[in-house]
Image (cartoon, rainbow, N blue to C red):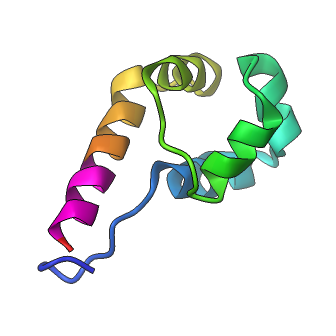
Amino acid sequence: MNNNGVRPIHPGEVLNKEFMEPLGMTVMDLGMPTNWPETEIEKLVKCQLRICTDLAIRLAIHLNTTPEFWMNLQSTYDLRKAEV
């Protein structure tokens, strides 16, 4: 938790809870169309991997969002973690 009482939220958690679960997607379902290794997608969903620009672009295309959305989630998470 940071000073406002809210824990930092990893972009992988957002990906899983807001996109994959509601759409019934698996790691394989997301790995294939993004052409990103399933092992890396799994690490991201487990909050063990940062989102890079390339992955942000691929997620944006496949999930109808923007790369900025994913990069902003990552930078906000990084800043909140640094504040702890």
Q: Is residue 82 left or right of residue 60?
A: left
Question: Could you say which is closer to the camera, residue 28 or residue 78?
Answer: 78
Which quadrant would the N terminus be assigned to in this image? bottom left
Above-or-below relation of 7 to 15? below
Residue 3 position within the rendered picture, expressed as x and y whole percent measured from the top left? 12, 80
Residue at x 58% of width, y 16% of height: 61
Residue at x 61% of width, y 47% of height: 44
Label tally: 0
Highlighted range, magenta = 76-83
Which quadrant would the C terminus be assigned to in this image? bottom left
Whether residue 40 appears in this view of the structure is yes
Residue at x 65% of width, y 52% of height: 45
Residue 15 position within the rendered picture, expressed as x and y whole percent measured from the top left? 58, 47
Q: Main secondary structure of the magenta part?
A: helix
Q: Is residue 36 left or right of residue 75?
A: right
Residue at x 40% of width, y 62% of height: 9
- Residue 40: which quarter of the image? top right
Residue 71 position within the rendered picture, expressed as x and y whole percent measured from the top left? 35, 32
Q: Is residue 78 magenta?
A: yes
Whether residue 66 appears in this view of the structure is no
